[in-house]
Amino acid sequence: MDRRTFILAAAALPLCAHAQPKNMKDIQALQSNWKSFLPAGAAVPSPSEPLKLSRDEWKKRLQGEAYKVLRDEGTERAGSSPLNHEKRPGIFACAGCGLPVFTSEMKYESGTGWPSFFTTIPGVFDTKKDSSFFQVRTEYHCKRCGGHHGHVFDDGPEPTGERWCNNGVALKFLPKDAKA
Ligand SMILES: [Zn+2]
């Protein structure tokens, strides 16, 4: 194939490769191809550029519920996020610092009322044990800004078996095609 055909084929890939991943090799491909979901020309930060702000600075940067969730480990009401219904190709970035954390192909419908993902862009979250509410859960937060996103459970779909249950207010969606 000539160069132009190759570029067109490569550009179309994220749109037609929407089959469910069957094995961990498919998952690794989703993880390593995440940049193909970025909008053209988007400049995004990396996990190795930490963003540290004071509580007052975060209060100025984040409104209402986003502050409560990201900085105080709050949980939004189930079913309240418009991102539950977001199905366009693109990137879900941390609403605190803009770090890309999931692609649209990592999202699935869990029926819980929170945006749910079966894997993440590699190296973007740190986890800790959370023993609140009389149960032990695994909390996860953004590696770059420390913002709380949600909890990860082991009842997700195969092949990862992971369910990254994310507060929608902790995410902002960047559609790959701004006109989509
Ligand atoms: Zn962040």
Image (cartoon, grey):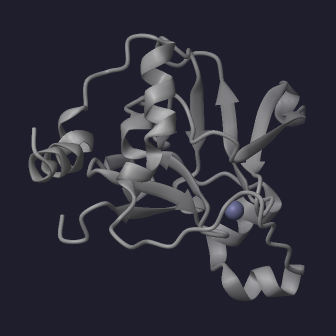
Q: Residue furthest front?
A: 2
Q: Position of residue 131 (x, y in %)?
A: 90, 32
Q: Nearer the viewer, residue 146 or 28?
A: 28
> Which residue does the image show at 85% across and 79% down from the upper left?
53
> Which residue does the image show at 60% across and 60% down from the upper left?
170
Q: Position of residue 98 (x, y in %)?
A: 59, 68
> Which residue does the image show at 72% across and 57% down from the upper left?
47
Q: Nearer the viewer, residue 93 or 70?
A: 93
Q: Quick check: 2 left or right of 46? A: left
Q: Picture quarter containing residue 126?
A: top right
Vertical placement of residue 147 versus 153, above or below: below
Q: Quick check: 104 left or right of 132? A: left
Q: Picture quarter containing residue 70?
A: bottom right
> Which residue does the image show at 50% across and 43% down from the upper left?
114
User: Image quadrant for the N terminus?
Assistant: top left
Ligand 1 shows up in the quarter that is: bottom right
Q: Position of residue 85 (x, y in %)?
A: 31, 49
Q: Nearer the viewer, residue 72 or 97?
A: 97
Q: Picture quarter containing residue 164?
A: top right
User: Image quadrant for the C terminus?
Assistant: bottom left
Vertical placement of residue 112 versus 24, above or below: below
Q: Quick check: 85 left or right of 173? A: left
Q: Quick check: 115 left or right of 9? A: right
Q: Position of residue 61 (x, y in %)?
A: 68, 84
Q: Count the numbered circles shown.
A: 0
